[in-house]
Image (cartoon, helix red, strand yellow):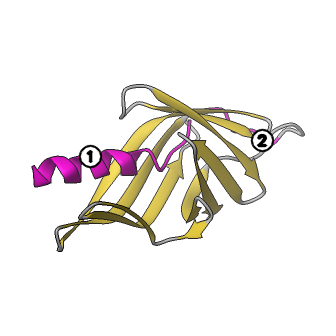
Amino acid sequence: MHFLRVAGFACLALLIGACGGSDSTSPNQVTVTGTWTMQTFNGTKLPYTISSGDTTLTITDDVLAIQSNGSYSDMTSFTATIAGNAQSASSTEVGTWTASGGTVTFDDQTDGGVTYQGSVTGNTLTEMVNGTTQVYQRE
């Protein structure tokens, strides 16, 4: 049962990250590729904690790597605490991305086809995923 709770929180953590496609520097395009580090989750600086009953998930780090070949990987590190027992873990989301202007569309291939969007302004990437907002800074 404890494993199922941790696995559930790991799935939630997978929803936190990621991106997908074409990276250009034409006047209507922005550069999307690179390594991005999550700064805030729903307006709160990391670490970000989510609690439910005797279970707590703390997101400690999230690094998104967007490749020029249209693929991405997003590794989220977290600590799950269940009834006072803490366990650190990480999860990785992979998928593809496309960009048009400053809008990036991510196709998560890890979680059964979840698609979400973000926007890039300079070195800031803001993702909107399932009602949450995650802000990344390019390294």
Q: Amino acid at mark 2?
A: Gly
Residue 78 image point, x, y percent: 33, 64
**Residue 23 falls within the magenta-colored stretch:** yes
Q: How many marks?
A: 2
Left-right relation of 129 to 53? right
Left-right relation of 33 to 88? right
Displayed quadrant of residue 51: bottom left
Q: Secondary structure at mark 2?
A: loop
Left-right relation of 7 to 117? left
Q: Which mark is residue 102?
A: 2
Name the residue tied to disc 1.
Answer: 8
The front one of 130 and 136 is 130
| Residue furthest to the left | 1
> What is the span of residues highlighted in magenta in the rendered image?
1-25
Residue 18 image point, x, y percent: 50, 45
Residue drawn at the location 29% of the way across and 50% of the way down: 10
| Residue furthest to the front | 53
Picture layout, residue 58 above or below residue 33:
below
| Residue furthest to the right | 27
